[in-house]
Image: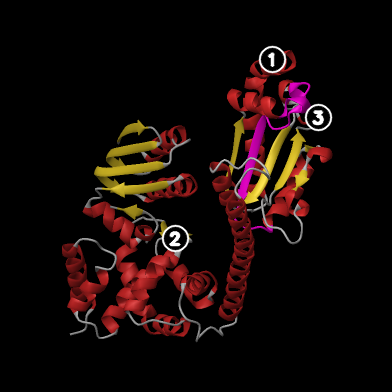
Amino acid sequence: MTINKEVNGSKLNIALVGRLDTTTSPKLEKELKASMDDIQELVFDFTQLEYISSAGLRVVLAAQKTMNRQGSMIVCNVNETVMEVFEVTGFVDLITIV
Amino acid sequence: MINKDKMIMEQYREDKDSFELLGNIVQEKLEKLVQDAGIRVMTVEHRVKKEHSLEGKLYRKGDKYHSLKDITDILGTRVVCYFSDDLDVIGDLIEQTFIVDRENSVDKRKLMQANSFGYLSLHYVCSLPEDAGYPQEVCNRRFEIQIRTILQHVWDAVNHDMGYKGDFGMPRTVTRQFARLAGLFEIADEEFIRVRNNMNTYTEQTREKIMHDGAEDVLIDIVSLKEYMLRNRKMGQFIQKIADIEHSEICQINPESYLLQLKWLNINTIGDLQKMLEENEALALKMAQDALEGSEIDIVTSNVALRYLCRAKLITGGYSEQQATEFIALTVNKKERAEHQAEKLFEKYAVS
């Protein structure tokens, strides 16, 4: 998985390419930990994210909890496969998907 | 500018960085204090007095100060809270944490005459305790902490913006208008406490009813739905059955997004929801199994229970596929997706 990160003031854009699973989630978790201080707006771009597993859901959940305190988070351009995972697990009620 | 004031300004320039450091330390400490005490506040902030502001102060009140140490508000910090009964709680925390200069600390609420209305907030002049491991350069420096409610903050900010610097000089009519507003805000602060207390009482009463299966007639709102999802035994068991499909962790989340969907399904009371659970549990669980079994997804939110119950109700409640599309479209923003989901739902579960 590739993580493309762009910081613009207090806004952080993260675009993921590939699969967010048990193997790749720690990489995203580490990247977020290093980047989220002082961030008020977090945008995940999932245009090229092919798949998300439980480990990926947990990283998204942790990011959402952080942003509940710091500002806001949105997830955009979610494909059908990933959207189905969000729906069947109820994560669709937890995160803002646009 | 006289020599004494020049000396104070020189000292200020030398010490400014230390006050900046002190400001960060005090702000962080205040944020931790309120957070640990579970008090929600709007803001904790600090500022180091600007050079021109100090010059102005020396010009206006120069006789009062002989050195920089005499001026207690070079660093000013402020805690703005939501409820006026938190003022004293925060005040107590400050007294336990910092060294308070009693002589210069003021409870403006007590200074105000009983028949007057005006600026009410709690002011402390403090310094850091010397034996607490803080850098030496920030110890022995006094700073001010103001604690006020949002409304007191609004009142003072507008007052300040209009150039009000003391008891004299403002036209009488304007002074009177400010006093009337202060009275109004004082009442509003008390009303906010009543609103919060009423909300707490309602939550506790609803919780009791739900825990003792006596909530049939309670209308569904954000409080009752949240308490039901958290504390009702049967709903808890149903959520657990869904989690057991893939041995999932359950992430408790706010069920607020289901208020509209339940209303659409004419589920208006906790009794209606309870009945919906009893009548649809088997089908809802089947739907959850079909969606989750073998997926290796081992985390679900508590809201999955409502998701599958609502979809089961669409099948058992005599709704048409068209109506199911309308229902799904409440939360799925693309019409085609809503149509597709309704079609699949009916294809799989509708009894012909």
**Circles 1 and 3 on the same subunit:** yes
- Discs 1/3, front: 1
Q: Quadrant of residue B117?
A: bottom right
Does residue B263 belong to the magenta stretch? no
Kind of residue at badge 3: Asp
Q: Judging from the image, what secondary structure is the residue with disc 1 in?
A: helix
Q: Which residue is mark 1?
A: B6
* Residue A20 position within the rendered picture, expressed as x and y whole percent measured from the top left: 33, 43
Q: Earlier in the sequence, mark 2 or mark 1?
A: 1
User: In the rendered image, is residue B283 in sight?
Assistant: yes
Which of pointers 1 and 3 lies earlier in the amino acid sequence? 1
Residue drawn at (34%, 68%) of the image: B289
Task: Specify whether B250 is left or right of B330.
Answer: right
In front: A5, or B168? B168
Colouring style: secondary structure
**Chain under callout 2:** B
Figure quadrant of residue A28:
top left
Question: Looking at the image, is mark 3 or mark 2 earlier in the sequence?
Answer: 3
> Alpha-carbon neighbours of circle 3 within 10 Å: few (<14), some, or many (≥20)?
few
Report the residue marked by disc 3. Answer: B131
Q: Position of residue B192 (x, y in %)?
A: 59, 64
Question: Alpha-carbon distance for marks 3 and 2?
Answer: 51 Å
- For mark 1, name the chain: B
Secondary structure of the residue carrying numbered label 2: loop
**Residue in front for this viewpoint, B130 or B109:** B109
Indicate whether B260 appears above or below B8.
Answer: below
Q: Secondary structure at mark 3?
A: helix
Q: Is residue B66 magenta?
A: yes
Specify the amino acid type for callout 1. Answer: Lys
Which of B80/B40 is in front?
A: B80
Badge number at residue B247: 2
